[in-house]
Image (cartoon, rainbow, N blue to C red):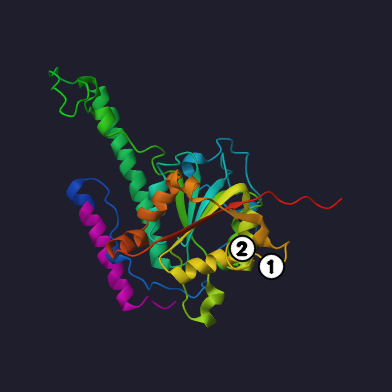
Amino acid sequence: MSTPPAKRQKRDQYRKRAAAAANEDTGKVKLPQKKFYRQRAHANPFSDHQLDYPLSPAHMDWSSHYPAFVNPDPEQKNLAGARKLLKDVEVVDIGCGFGGLLVGLAPLLPETLMLGMEIRTQVIEYVENRIQALRTQQNQLKNSSITASESPAPAIPAEPATDGASPEAASTPETSNSPVPGEYQNISALRSNTMKFFPNFFGKHQLSKIFICFPDPHFKAKKHKARIISENLNAEYAYALKPGGLLYTITDVEEYHHWVLRHFREEGEHEASEGGVKDLFERVSEEELASDPCVEVMRESTEEGKKVTRNKGNKYVAVFRRKADPEWPA
């Protein structure tokens, strides 16, 4: 078996040394550093990436991704013999990048299982290490909080609040170190090619939200077939989304935004024939989006969103609701 390139070996050594040094210095787990997970911004979705994928959604082993949500009954197993979960994955971030959206949504939807899908090897490794580090940090905070509450504290007069709050509301070990709801046990990520294997992971009407944030625009016309939004892929998204579910899109490329609108019958195709997959979606109004906290997370928590903000660029948002399946003709 051939050894990895020298550049990759050196990068792996740097990464391990940095992680070990950080943990030795403080005794606490630190988040991974992106500089040790550099990779090209683009990947060819039509290449053979030697990916692992389940035969069907009923064969997918989710137990290692969400151990806190594994069904306690050991007899509850799927078709592949893996332990079932107490609930299904409901939210998917397609092309999750470095996981900013997942981390932002984790405390917002603490009881909802969310998954990031990414094709780039180094990037998905970073996301996996980031989630594991966040989970460990939350466990450390929880343990220190419990220890502080169990040990008797000396009687110290309460200092007057400086922000108008009552003394009873002042910070204590229990409140200041309280873990984020869900403790990041509700998010995970895996390496996959959505364009090829999306239906292998999710069943009919399983998902409530799909996020497609700052996708590769593939500017050249001959590359448009690689765009993650197309008629064929939209049909797969419609299959997996439950009626009432939402598909979120955001991009900083205006031309791509118009591409999205055209492929959801929201621009330039109102005279087209009825009966296609486009009829299964309707665009969510701006008024409704203003009250949706997920939109703000999508705008500001993703790495690309932060980059666009720094560069003072534009962000084009479009969210589509999955309509109910039409009734079969009598």
Q: Quadrant of residue 293?
A: top left
Marks 2/1: CA distance? Answer: 9 Å
Q: How many marks?
A: 2
Q: Nearer the viewer, residue 318 or 36?
A: 318
Residue where numbered disc 2 is placed: 265
Q: Are marks 2 and 1 in contact (CB under 8 Å)?
A: yes
Residue 222: x %, y % from top left: 53, 82
Residue 273: x %, y % from top left: 72, 66
Q: Is residue 180 above or below residue 64?
A: above
Residue where numbered disc 1 is placed: 272
Secondary structure beneath label 1: loop
State the predominant SS element of the stretch in magenta.
helix
Q: Nearer the viewer, residue 172 or 325?
A: 325
For badge 1, the amino acid type reads Ala
Residue 30 is marked as none
Q: Earlier in the sequence, mark 2 or mark 1?
A: 2
From the viewer's perspective, is 312 left or right of 183? left
| Residue 62 visible, this angle | no
Q: Nearer the viewer, residue 141 or 265?
A: 265
For badge 2, the amino acid type reads Arg
Q: Residues within 10 Å of mark 2 (few under 14, many from 20)?
A: many
Residue 33: x %, y % from top left: 28, 60
**Residue ID at (40%, 44%):** 184
Residue 21 within the magenta-colored segment of the rendering: yes
Q: Residue furthest right?
A: 330
**Residue ID at (46%, 45%):** 292
Q: Residue furthest front?
A: 271
Residue 220 within the magenta-colored segment of the rendering: no
**Residue ID at (45%, 41%):** 109
Q: Is residue 77 above or below residue 258?
A: above
Q: Start and end of the magenta stretch?
A: 1-22
